[in-house]
Amino acid sequence: MLTTEQPHPLTAQLGEVARADAAAALRMLFRVDEDVLRRYAAEVASGRMPEVAREVQAALDRGGRVFFTGCGATGRLGILLAALWRGFWQQAAWEGWTDAATAADWEERVVPVMAGGDYAFVRSVEGFEDHEAMGARQLRDRGVRAGDVVFAVTEGGETPFVIGTAWEALRAGAHTFFVYNNPDEVLRAHVARSRAVLDEPGIRKWNLTTGPMAVTGSTRMQATSIELAVLVTVLEGVIRTCGRVRVPAVGGENAGGSPDRIPGRFLEALRRMHEQLLAGPTLAALAEWVRLESEVYRNAGKVNYHAFSLAADLLTDTAERTPTFSLPPFRKHGDVEAADSWAFLFVPCPDSASAWRRIFRREPCCISWSADEVRQLVPPERWPAVCEALGRITQQELMRFRIGEDGLADRPPGPGDAAVALVGDEDLPLWEAPQGSLRQRLEEARASGAATGLVLMAPAEVWDRWRRVGAGAPSATFLAGVETVGEGFWLGGPVRVVTKMMLNAVSTAVMARLGRVMGNVMTWVVPSNGKLVDRATRYIAQLTGLDYGEANRLLFETLAHVEDRMRAGRAHPPVVGLAAMRHRCGGDWAAAEKRLLAELGTCRMEPAGAAGPA
């Protein structure tokens, strides 16, 4: 019944359109992002963002901290927000905008709490999201206390972990905001735990409903985009009212003006960049990227991404493809049994420890509970699985994701592969200098026979210079990106939101071209627990017109057909897609499989376990 789980009418034929016309598919996705702009405009009109920024600022003045709690996409959102905040104060100390002691103090004032800890930023962790006690414990471990501010962020408004953090914040005496994306009346009618939060006067509610997602149920898209836009605006306002930093004026104005003007200027920048995403030249370049990457994957190749200032943004999108489209997650160094990752990220740092510090802007914070501590947090039947997962989500295990230059030897590019660099304004020396590390990586890939791509997020003057002298063209098969607007925002909020929209749309269009979306349904979901069985059933009902009970029966018939292959870890067709094809065409299972794979274009398949949890 949740709005975020409903199909969006604008993308009803996304899968079919993407396979025929990448640009048209991207246009569909960017049109749905207009829902985000409309909701943000409503928030601007309400005046709430500057009001909340002042409340947060007052709490910080009294020595408090700000916490962002979340699961999955909203957990990664909190980590990104904290990294942007910390990056600003690190730069402020370096540039002399404030003294070192002030910068060191205020850098620590924003704290992310993601279900499963920082390890979950790159690979999902089983057993945390479904338990309120887990959220309460993680927030308690980070020292929440009276006078702090907690933003408990959940796209659907029903995630137990996030609800647990809201109740814990209230118990601690913190100012508590519950941020969500479904209508109050729907949550009250259907989700008891959500109703309890909505009816609690001590918890402030912030409803950011935009409507259905571009891909049914994929809340990493519009739901998280509006949350990013609103919450980064709040932090921008806090910095401007704190009185502890003096940043030089940009373009004749102190970038964004007074705190009350920030939301309006933010909206203007968003609109101007979003218009570019729909414009012919930008759309055509992004479509070229989609076609290249989809063909690499279709032919069993791999993609290496390279980024520095926008590495956290790119890693977020890459990590979220695993649960959304059932792709193999990032493979750890030394793991010879796991399926190879379709895509991977490298950061131009000499080793992975420094690369992770660059992404988080701090030392990683991973979970280190004992088995006895876990026993108090989960039902007895869940205890063994959660305890087993704890051993695989430590900081030591996180470091096995070799995203620094020490990991390059693990994934050498070759013919049939691709390397793509995402370059922000501050990364230009890493590309324009002859020995710049981003340029070197793409030149090495091209020399090895791999395709290359360059995605530029920079102001118009940089694009104009590159068009004149060809600074970006020699080492890249394609050049895509956006002429950025609003660089004067101290946290770079508008650029981060548009970068997210662009990355979400490109990765979704790639997967749709590969048959991992039918209509606007994620047909490759693996129904491995009750929630996913329900989602798979609803997807089958949507695709076939069957009622829920009939769709559920068809789902289990399909699971029985592929069960042997799933248990053996062998490749098999997508369960939802196969069920829909069997219903559409009738006949035996072999015929349904053959027809499905023909429609998918001999789509690359992976073992079911390849995309499993940590």
Image (cartoon, helix red, strand yellow):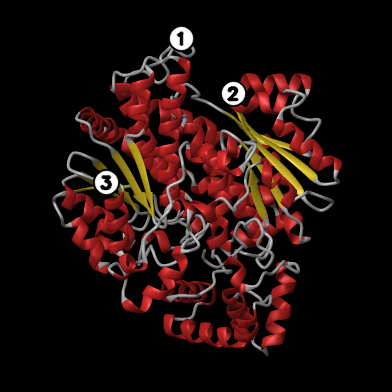
Residue 96, which numbered label? Answer: none
Identify the secondary structure beneath mark 2.
loop
**The disc labelled 3 sits on which kind of residue?**
Gly
Residue beneath the point at 52% across and 82% down: 555
Q: Can residue 29 be seen in this view?
A: no
Residue that badge 1 annotates: 252
Q: Who is closer to the viewer here, 476 or 280?
A: 476
Is the residue marked by circle 3 packed among few (<14), some (14-19), or many (20+) residues within 10 Å? few
The residues tagged by marks 1 and 3 sit, at their Cα atoms, a distance apart of 42 Å
Q: Is residue 87 visible?
A: yes
Disc 2 or 3, which lies upstream in sequence?
A: 3
* Tally of numbered discs: 3
Residue that badge 2 annotates: 459
Identify the secondary structure beneath mark 3.
loop
- In this view, which residue lies farthest toward the left? 201
Residue 143, which numbered label? Answer: 3
